[in-house]
Image (tube, rainbow, N blue to C red):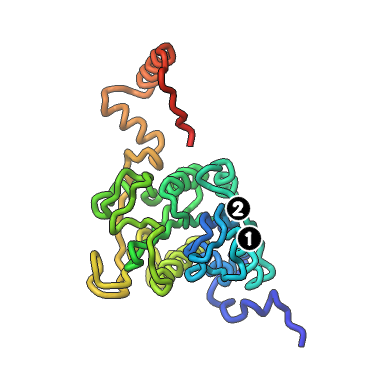
């Protein structure tokens, strides 16, 4: 029997999504771990035609139990192992595997984001999350930020659409007390309800977060906004067990976080004008004062220089 693979493989979902649209789209997944690898997989089986996966790490034994890949991939770069699994699921998908550290290679990160229709930030580095937020905003690209809580008792999925929703920095600032967060983007985000992606957790619990994030990603790429059918909120909390914000297992809550008009990440010139006005200056006088301060600083001896480049 001859099978037309391109026509037959998506036969059972063809009436549910716009396959032609998805097949032309580029999804960038930053982080090839338990969440990132499975979100990439779910995107491919939904019809996304082009995936870029970015992660510097190699697959280790303790990764396997929650990862898309298995023991046969031990020691390989996660992105290469994931790419092979995705191609096995859909031979027509275009997969680019980039084994680099997005935290250290902002040029690589920005190149990928410029090409993306959507970005999924599934990295476990808070500083990388903040960098991705800034880069996606600058490029005008929507982004999804999934994360699990301690022991995977729950998790969250954040969607940022530039110019329309609160950005990740707005959300971190607003929810700092609720989540016991420290300064946004710091590596000290270790409290119980912080979405630090390095926490232990069963895949039976973590898997919910990857599926919710993948669904939100697909709907975002397709521009689906029907609240009766689609995830139209932008900050989803998911609870696997009865604790903290959840009164019963398998409960969800939507948080509505407004954009911060003074946010340094997403409010741009409006934030700058508001800030300088708060100290009694306008933009021109602030620039003059800034140049004066820099001149004084350059003329002063530096006894203990520190390399601030990260």
Q: Is residue 127 left or right of residue 96?
A: left
Quadrant of residue 193 within the rendered picture: bottom left
Between discs 1 and 2, the one toward the N terminus: 1
Above or below, 83 relative to 138: below
Q: Residue at x 37, y 59 (%)?
A: 234
Circles 1 and 2 in contact, beta carbons < 8 Å: yes
Above or below, 125 relative to 288: below
Q: Residue at x 57, y 41 (%)?
A: 107
The residue that disc 2 covers is 99
Q: CA distance from mark 1 to mark 2?
A: 8 Å
Quadrant where the N terminus is found in the figure:
bottom right
Judged from the image, the secondary structure of the residue bearing numbered disc 1 is helix
Which of the labelled discs sits on residue 80, or is there none? 1
- Residue 219 appears in the rendering: no
Q: Percent position (x, y) of residue 25?
A: 60, 60
Q: Residue at x 25, y 72 (%)?
A: 242
């Amino acid at each position: 029997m001859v099978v037309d693979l391109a026509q037959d493989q998506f036969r059972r979902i063809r009436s549910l999504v716009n396959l032609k649209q998805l097949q032309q789209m580029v999804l960038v997944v930053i982080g090839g771990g338990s969440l990132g690898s499975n979100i990439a997989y779910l995107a491919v089986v939904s019809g996304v035609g082009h995936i870029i996966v970015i992660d510097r790490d190699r697959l280790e034994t303790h990764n396997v139990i929650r990862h898309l890949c298995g023991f046969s991939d031990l020691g390989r770069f996660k992105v290469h192992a994931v790419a092979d699994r995705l191609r096995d699921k859909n031979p027509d998908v275009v997969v680019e595997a980039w084994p680099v550290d997005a935290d250290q290679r902002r040029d690589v990160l920005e190149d990928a984001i410029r090409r993306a229709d959507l970005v999924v930030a599934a990295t476990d580095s808070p500083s990388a999350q903040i960098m991705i937020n800034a880069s996606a905003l600058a490029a005008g690209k929507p982004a999804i930020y999934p994360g699990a809580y301690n022991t995977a008792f729950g998790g969250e999925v954040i969607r940022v659409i530039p110019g329309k929703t609160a950005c990740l920095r707005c959300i971190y600032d607003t929810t700092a007390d609720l989540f016991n967060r420290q300064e946004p983007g710091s590596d000290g985000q270790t409290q119980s309800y912080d979405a630090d992606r390095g926490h232990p957790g069963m895949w039976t619990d973590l898997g919910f977060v990857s599926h919710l994030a993948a669904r939100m990603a697909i709907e975002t790429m397709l521009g689906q906004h029907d609240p009766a059918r689609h995830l139209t909120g932008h900050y989803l909390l998911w609870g696997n067990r009865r604790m903290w914000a959840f009164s019963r297992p398998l409960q969800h809550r939507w948080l509505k976080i407004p954009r911060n008009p003074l946010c340094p990440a997403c409010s741009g010139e409006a934030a700058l004008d508001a800030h300088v006005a708060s100290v009694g200056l306008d933009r021109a006088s602030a620039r003059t004062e800034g140049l004066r301060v820099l001149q004084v600083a350059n003329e002063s001896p530096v006894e203990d220089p520190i390399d601030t480049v990260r």
